[in-house]
């Protein structure tokens, strides 16, 4: 089989369903798992997952206490008897907790806890003016809330920057395209074509035979830029590229053009990996890549297929419609047309 | 321009919207002269197809005059009179090359959505929810037609709109359903549902050599049209037991092929109908497969069940044991309209088929809301509604 030369040991961390086709171009070993874990430990006293799990269970514990023993808890913190409010707060806590434990959008759920902390402080302030309040106990409770709030703010910032995408994920996708490996290779090798089907790219400019400058767009008009270099170039078979040393982000990609069986076109196999740095650039890159980089790359490949096979990208953006409801206006856009 | 818009479940309105523009090189803009309401539009109207949004322009059966073409369309010119197939097909992908046009891989911008529902995406379809692309439909004064170099077919001026309009969907759909039955001399074909697709299935089955065609419905006017289409026997299922009558008519063997031209809103009697209504209302099944169940049970051993009726999601209590133990063949699919338009146009030209006999109502575009209501409720013996944008008082050779 012609693909034999491509068989190399697969990264166990690949998310690919077609992991057996791991690319030979991958120099992912450059960032070994150990290195990445060390990197993670340098920044976090807790791993992100541990942090969100801790806050999640804390929320659920507190929420259960508020729901099951609202009066006892009210007396303990000196605010008196307000079981209805206390139970409502319990529901809020449990919601935040389950959200954090779900491990999806943990940053947003951690921010919901920060909002909850602010609400608690406001309620404690209001309760302090009640005649049946116990000011000392309320002050102690407020101090406790402030302590938790500090942890929540810290967690929110860290989890927001970290949650997308997981740093060690290699995302791979493949799609059969009704064309030849030669034509597809030629199209891709002209890297300035990439933004025509990769939605997150604003532009790619060739700066040399193997080097190029990439600009990716982020929401609110922001962008992230880097320089990349083709590190492997097998005419009509495949390409591998990666960011040059000193770039703000680390990005690697490989693409292979594999003749499909019985002349049914070409199977294009892509593997990509973005490693967002800590801080602002990392957060922006995470926003660019969205929650599901795998889905985004699949959509990119679909657009490539449309371009190559039909010469255009199917769209309805710009067509007339009747009056949309709020739901339609917020749901329909570039991704779902 | 004026366009028929979906405004919520059971709500249709004509709105003034911007005129369509060329968005891609292979687009054309068509000025619509005639457009029909399809039975499958009623599924959108009733809210049975997910991913509809308020403001969506409806309509996938339409024809008219080319008023603008993109730079990639060289086979059409401004002024050409064309009929447009309801699936949007690129003509270049694996499936288009195999003439499986309704499975085009490149025309659905929301393919990811369809993959979630069905595993893979079919072609984009005009005016038929966002799961099939969210394309603005042709129940409007103008419509944008993507891949216009592949879909639209020029029709001779000698044939009036009403004779060629149904080449866009219901005629090829009925024909493909009959073709799927692989009709042999002596065969008996039973057709559930005598709406437009059922009627053209009956007509096509006869054209393809069926010896005996049995039509099943409950509306006398539709059964009368079935006779007109060539049915040998009509069964009103309010009066007779369909299963035992079919056995009786075939010496106990059952029809050689059964066609379900009803789809997901089947009307049946008794406990199973109530069961399906309840489950559908509670969103526990999306489709009511009453006709399909009966067709499977009625079909002879080794026979074919052909399903042109639309199903969108999940069905319940499907007698799969009958399919296995009777070795049935199931054929279905959205119609590969492009494949059938030219041969069927020839049959219309030489007088073998006159599809206009199904039309019962001709209305203006701004009367769409009433048209949908009358068609859904099968009031006024309604079988097919044709709208004529720009015509003040639409009338024709077959005024009801």
Image (cartoon, coloured by chain):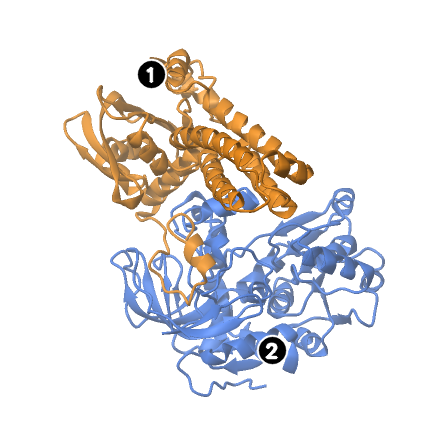
Chain colours: A orange, B blue
Classify residue A25 as left or right of residue B321: left
Q: Chain of mark 1?
A: A
Relative vertical location of residue A96 with respect to residue B155 in this rendering, above or below: above
Q: Which quadrant of the figure has residue B294?
A: bottom right
- Residue behind mark 1: A27
Classify residue A234 as left or right of residue B348: left
Residue A113 pos. (x, y %) = 49, 37
Which SS class for mark 2? helix
What residue is shown at x 33% (from left), y 18% (from top)? A25
What residue is shown at x 42% (from left), y 73% (from top)? B15
Asked if residue B47 can be seen in this view, the reply is yes
Circles 2 and 1 on the same subunit = no
Q: Nearer the viewer, residue A215 or A210?
A: A215
Classify residue B139 as left or right of residue A220: right
What residue is shown at x 38% (from left), y 16% (from top)? A36
Q: Which quadrant of the figure has residue A332?
A: bottom left
- Residue behind mark 2: B374
Q: Quadrant of the N terminus of chain B?
A: bottom left
Asked if residue A263 can be seen in this view, the reply is no
What residue is shown at x 57% (from left), y 52% (from top)? B333
Q: Chain of mark 2?
A: B
Dot 2 alpha-carbon crowd within 10 angstroms: few under 14, some 14 to 19, many 20 or more: some
Which SS class for mark 1? loop
């Amino acid at each position: 089989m012609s693909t034999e030369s491509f068989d190399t040991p697969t990264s166990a961390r690949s998310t690919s369903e077609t992991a057996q086709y791991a690319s030979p171009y991958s120099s992912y070993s450059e960032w070994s798992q150990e290195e990445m874990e060390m990197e993670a430990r340098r920044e976090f006293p807790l791993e992100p997952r541990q942090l969100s799990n801790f806050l999640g269970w804390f929320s659920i514990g507190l929420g259960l206490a508020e729901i099951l023993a609202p009066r006892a808890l009210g007396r303990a913190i000196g605010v008196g008897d307000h079981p209805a409010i206390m139970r409502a707060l319990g529901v809020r806590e449990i919601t935040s907790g389950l959200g954090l434990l779900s491990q999806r959008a943990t940053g947003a759920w951690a921010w919901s806890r920060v909002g909850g902390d602010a609400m608690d402080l406001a309620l404690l302030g209001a309760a302090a003016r009640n005649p049946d309040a116990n000011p000392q106990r309320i002050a102690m409770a407020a101090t406790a809330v402030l302590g938790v709030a500090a942890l929540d703010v810290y967690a929110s910032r860290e989890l927001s920057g970290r949650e997308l995408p997981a740093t060690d994920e290699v995302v791979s996708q493949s799609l059969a395209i009704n064309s030849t490996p030669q034509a597809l290779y030629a199209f891709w090798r002209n890297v300035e074509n990439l933004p025509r089907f990769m939605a997150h790219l604003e532009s790619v400019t060739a700066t040399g035979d193997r080097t190029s400058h990439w600009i990716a767009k982020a929401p609110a008009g922001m962008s992230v830029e880097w320089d990349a270099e083709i590190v492997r170039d097998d005419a009509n078979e495949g390409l591998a590229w990666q960011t040059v040393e000193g770039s703000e982000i680390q990005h690697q990609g490989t693409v292979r053009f594999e003749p499909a069986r019985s002349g049914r076109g070409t199977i294009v196999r892509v593997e990509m990996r973005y490693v967002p740095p800590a801080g602002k650039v990392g957060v922006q890159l995470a926003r660019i890549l969205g929650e599901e980089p795998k889905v985004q790359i699949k959509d990119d490949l679909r657009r490539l297929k449309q371009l190559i096979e039909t010469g255009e990208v199917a769209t309805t953006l710009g067509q007339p419609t009747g009056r949309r409801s709020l739901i339609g206006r917020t749901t329909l856009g570039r991704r779902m047309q | 321009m004026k366009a028929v818009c979906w405004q919520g479940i059971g709500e249709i309105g004509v709105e003034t919207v911007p005129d369509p523009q060329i968005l891609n090189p292979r687009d054309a803009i068509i000025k619509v002269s005639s457009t029909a309401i399809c039975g499958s539009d009623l599924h959108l109207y009733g809210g049975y197809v997910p991913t509809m949004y308020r403001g969506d322009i409806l309509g996938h059966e339409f024809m008219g005059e080319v008023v603008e073409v993109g730079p990639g369309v060289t086979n059409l010119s401004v002024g050409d009179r064309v009929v447009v197939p309801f699936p949007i097909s690129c003509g270049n992908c694996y499936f288009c090359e195999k003439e499986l046009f309704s499975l085009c891989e490149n025309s659905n911008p929301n393919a990811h959505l369809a993959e979630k529902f069905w595993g893979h995406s079919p072609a984009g379809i005009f005016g038929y929810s966002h799961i099939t692309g969210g394309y603005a439909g042709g129940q409007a004064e103008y419509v944008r037609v993507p891949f216009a170099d592949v879909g639209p077919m020029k029709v001779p001026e000698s044939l009036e709109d009403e004779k060629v309009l149904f080449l866009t969907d219901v005629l090829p759909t009925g024909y493909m359903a009959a073709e799927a039955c692989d009709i042999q001399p002596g065969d008996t074909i039973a057709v559930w549902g005598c709406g437009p697709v059922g009627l053209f299935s009956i007509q096509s089955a006869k054209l393809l050599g069926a010896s005996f065609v049995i039509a099943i419905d409950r509306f006398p006017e539709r059964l009368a049209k079935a006779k007109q289409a060539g049915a040998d026997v009509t069964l009103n299922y309010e009066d007779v037991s369909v299963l035992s009558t079919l056995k009786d008519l075939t010496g106990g063997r059952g029809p050689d092929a059964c066609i379900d031209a009803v789809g997901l809103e089947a009307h049946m009697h008794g406990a199973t109908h109530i069961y399906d209504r309840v489950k559908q209302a509670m969103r526990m099944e999306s489709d009511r497969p009453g006709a399909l169940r009966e067709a499977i049970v009625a079909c002879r051993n080794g026979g074919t069940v052909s399903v042109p009726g639309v199903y969108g999601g999940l069905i319940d209590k499907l007698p799969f044991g009958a399919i296995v133990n009777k070795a049935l063949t199931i054929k279905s699919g959205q119609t590969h309209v492009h494949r059938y338009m030219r041969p069927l146009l020839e049959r219309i030209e030489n007088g073998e088929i006159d599809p206009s006999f199904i039309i019962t109502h001709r209305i203006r575009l701004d009367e769409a809301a009433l048209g949908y209501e009358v068609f859904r409720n099968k009031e006024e013996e309604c079988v097919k509604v044709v709208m004529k944008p720009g015509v003040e008082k639409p009338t024709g050779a077959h005024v009801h």
